[in-house]
Amino acid sequence: MTEDEIRQILRDHRAGVLSDDGALERLRNLPFEDLGFANVDHHRSLRQGFPEAVFGAGKTPQQVARIVESLAKNTHNILVTRATAEQYAHVREIAPAAEFHASARTIVVMKDQTIRGKGTVLVISAGTSDVAVAEEAVVTLKVLGNTVDPLYDVGVAGLHRLLDRRDRLTSARVIIVLPGWRVHCRAWSVDWFRHR
């Protein structure tokens, strides 16, 4: 539940639109809701500025759908990471607006398209084998209200492929670099120094 949602409950109560019992019912699951197999944190967006993300790995499709159903009571975006197509099929039954991003392995329910970030986030992956992780970062950043510019496969074969995109590098407010050439360079330099 967001700060705005809590303020609206208070306004509705003060205006007489919402009874004491109605206000209590809407606040009952703060700060979390016990589903028996998971505790869904409805208070996180108030504490952290963004809602809880659901880690799909290891959860049954029914569990993921039940968690999404619980989160869907609020007005914030919902993100399930490390999700499967089977989990998505179950989520779509209770959240028809849900989208599955197969390459990112994410399920998203976008309720709020507001851009909150202050500039563009450039997500760079060194090689194509890093694209799945990069896509997960891109989807997550968008769910959190950022403008995102993905830049893939620019590092392993040579620095010239990255520097050719200098305009995108300099215009980004934040740059996130995924492994690949950095990891290879670091491993090479560590080995070189070890053998000296």
Image (cartoon, rainbow, N blue to C red):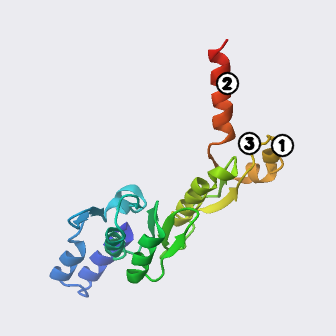
Task: Give the number of the disc on residue 148.
Answer: none
Disc 1 and disc 2: Cα gap in Å?
20 Å
For label 3, count other residues whose C-alpha is less than 10 Å away and answer few (under 14), some (14-19) or many (20+).
Answer: some
Mark 2 — residue? 189
Q: Residue at x 27, y 85 (%)?
A: 15
Query: Which amino acid type corresponds to the residue marked 3 in the rendered image?
Result: Val
Judge left or right: residue 4 versus residue 164.
left
Nearer to me, 69 or 147? 69
Judge left or right: residue 102 versus residue 151.
left
Query: Which amino acid type corresponds to the residue marked 2 in the rendered image?
Result: Ser
Q: Secondary structure at mark 3?
A: loop
Residue 94 point in image, percent of width and height: 38, 81
For label 2, count other residues whose C-alpha is less than 10 Å away and answer few (under 14), some (14-19) or many (20+).
Answer: few
In the picture, the quarter occupied by the N terminus is bottom left
Disc 2 and disc 3: Cα gap in Å?
15 Å
Q: Earlier in the sequence, mark 2 or mark 3?
A: 3
Residue 157 point in image, percent of width and height: 78, 42
Is the Cβ of the residue at disc 3 closer than 8 Å to that at disc 1?
no
In the picture, the quarter occupied by the C terminus is top right
Mark 1 — residue? 160
